[in-house]
Image (tube, coloured by chain):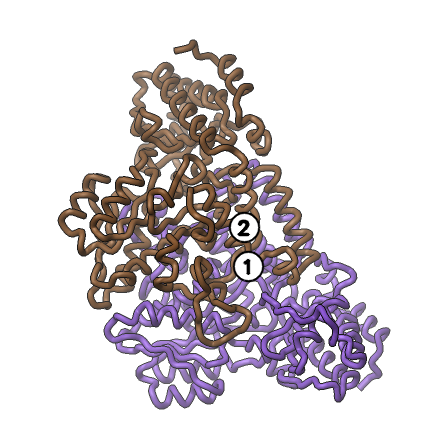
Chain colours: A brown, B purple
Amino acid sequence: VTQRNRAALEALDRADELRAMREQFELPPDIVYLDGNSLGALSRRTRERLAQVVSGEWGKGLIRSWNSADWISLPTRVGDRIARLIGAEPGTVIAADSTSVNLYKLLSMALQLDPPRRLIVTERGNFPTDLYVAQGLMTQLAGCVPAPELVRVEGGADAIAELLQQRGDEVAVVFLTHVDYVSGRLHDMRGVTLSAHAAGALMLWDLSHSAGALPLSLAECDVDLAVGCGYKYLNGGPGAPAYLYVARRLQDRCVPPLTGWMGHADPFAFSGDYQPAPGMLHYLCGTHSVLAMSALETGVELLLEAPMEALRRKSMALGDLFIELVDTHCGNQGLNLISPRDGAHRGSQVAYTHRAGYAVMQALIACGVIGDFRAPDVLRFGFAPLYVRYVDVWDAVMALARILREGSWDQPGFQARAPVT
Amino acid sequence: VTQRNRAALEALDRADELRAMREQFELPPDIVYLDGNSLGALSRRTRERLAQVVSGEWGKGLIRSWNSADWISLPTRVGDRIARLIGAEPGTVIAADSTSVNLYKLLSMALQLDPPRRLIVTERGNFPTDLYVAQGLMTQLAGCVPAPELVRVEGGADAIAELLQQRGDEVAVVFLTHVDYVSGRLHDMRGVTLSAHAAGALMLWDLSHSAGALPLSLAECDVDLAVGCGYKYLNGGPGAPAYLYVARRLQDRCVPPLTGWMGHADPFAFSGDYQPAPGMLHYLCGTHSVLAMSALETGVELLLEAPMEALRRKSMALGDLFIELVDTHCGNQGLNLISPRDGAHRGSQVAYTHRAGYAVMQALIACGVIGDFRAPDVLRFGFAPLYVRYVDVWDAVMALARILREGSWDQPGFQARAPVT
């Protein structure tokens, strides 16, 4: 192990193959931003693109820009770019709505594909909105025969496998988040997908915490369905549109419940009867926000310019460095690592519990180190490899060590609840 | 009738009480824009606000802006502004998702409120996406007992009344678009709502073509449910978020089918069980686009600075003037007015059929007069009273008269299909 000091890390940053990417982002100079897993940062290109969309396309082009600026094809254009990012074929991804709404579409559809199968299976620790969406669907369909049922297993992939062994022939779809939003633990996409398929069930992955941070190969893993979020590693801006993926073999086998004009085979014929557009288009419903989609398009575009293997390498190196520095500088200060130590089993984030987690995070933020807190006691640090530097990790851990050593989190003003992802 | 000429109309514009509003919009000087009913125009304030949201709130504030810039309350803040615009109480409107998705939420909910009632009633000429949404819901719930049924009557309010008389006790909800998207004909909101209530049914209005263009009083008319679009008269930008209204008495009587974390009573507790937030909040689902919501907020803000009575007066005057000038200058040229002549029965648009409607509209657009075309043969002109001038109407009709007289629409290049609202 080489001697760690700030100068050595500065040297790593100078030699970083992704260094030019960092320079595209407009991060405030006094901030260490370790929350790109909640909200990706703004790039110059995105700011400039938005100014052009607003003044030029909307302001001057007005309604004509639906054609002249090709606003109409933003969902498929952005979708095809995201497909490249997640190892999916062109024509299998479309950008639309929110992750929650897209998940609702796919779960509802999964129940229709093979009607005797009425179970929707997930794990108890799945991201809450994913659970809420499934619960809402169960309530809505409670009067159907047979009524669908949501099963939430305790204990991850093993528990899923056990459930599939016991009740596999009743399962319509298994849905999991690929990278756990708290611990950052990675599911084995290929393995779990295989076991769902062995039971005749569909497999749906939520890629919100993995797309853009690690290599994915949905096509090779033979994934059926997926959803994901645009505002984290994709840098699509706050509340960016989300996306959904449907394997080609399933695309035209049924129609999602949200049938709006943008998913119609011929929206501008204004026919009174719904006719689904072929392929991914019928997963659209209402009109998409051009501003939001344009920001997302630029975010994904930038990400695609960085080699995914380089992103993953740097992401693991940053996480490993963080853990190593916390081991060295924050020992015996009440921090417990809840993420896998082995970077290969981890997404692009590292989490610790601390009994005063919320106050510690507030104190860190007050020092300009932005991570986030997850109830009840988790400190979460994300390492978006596109713009986080090795010195950022150093500065963050030094600030954390100082706060813990001096107890400076134990101050008035660090008590309020944090109301955001 | 005073003598009409361009100079007289210039004088009207100079004396216009809404003149200062027009100056806030950044319309290209060489364009007559009569399509604000499809896509509202950009104001300087919106452009500046977006630049600030992008560079300041997102770029510098990053994740902190969910609190510091109060991104989190955008849906209720914008909703409460829209409530003022449509004569609804505070706390009865929220901005969210698209019109189609919001309609889906409310129709699904209407079916749950009084379960023996299984009919959803509308008119055949309702805006197509409204029909598609209802059709998708019917397909999704086809396996429920009893299965819901969509009834599309032919012939407007009278046919609705007749259906209510015959099968009123089976009707869960009647849903109509207040201003017809083709003819601009206004439904009698109070009367139709009363007759739905007399049958024990709920009344849902789509306000997409009325909000922001004419006074509405949802509270006084005792409306149950409503949805509407943000990108037309509200000037929220292309594909702006939509909104939904739920009368207070119904808000907590059931939960919509799309239950995501933004509608949870305590989203950041990350509980595994869905608990609906009180009031309108549980009509949210996923995370909202901050860029799109901010543009919408500014659009609505500007609209609220203009007295609604003045907007309506000017809107009717512009429409009346258009019809009068077409009568005078385009007689015997194959145009047939399909909008009510009486401004009191009309929204803020005027439509004509012409056998070569699409080519004529293309020729007009090529001259810088932007209206739109609706299949099969409709020329549609919108008069957003916030920024359309009397001289715009003059210039538009003069261009139309010239095109029709000279037959200059009958040229190659004016044939392609128009792919947008």
Q: Is residue A121 left or right of residue A358?
A: left
Quarter assignment of residue A321: top left
- Return the chain for callout 2: A
> Is residue B54 depicted above or below B74 in this figure?
above
Q: Is residue A75 visible?
A: yes
Q: Residues within 10 Å of mark 2 (few under 14, many from 20)?
A: many
**Residue depicted at x 24% and y 52%:** A201
The answer to the question of whether label 1 and label 2 lie on touching residues, with beta carbons closer than 8 A, is: yes
Residue that lies at the very extreme toward the top in this rendered image? A3
- SS class of the residue under badge 2? helix
**Residue depicted at x 62% and y 84%:** B338
Q: Nearer the viewer, residue A400 or B223?
A: A400
Q: Position of residue A350 (x, y in %)?
A: 36, 29
- SS class of the residue under badge 1? loop
Q: Is residue A245 left or right of residue B417?
A: left
Q: Mark 1 — residue?
A: B239
> Is residue A99 depicted above or below B65 in this figure?
below
Q: Nearer the viewer, residue B65 or A55?
A: A55
Q: Considering the image in quadrants, where does the N terminus of chain B appear? A: bottom right
Whether discs 1 and 2 lie on one chain: the answer is no
Q: Amino acid at mark 2?
A: Ala
* Cα separation between marks 1 and 2: 9 Å
Q: Mark 2 — residue?
A: A292
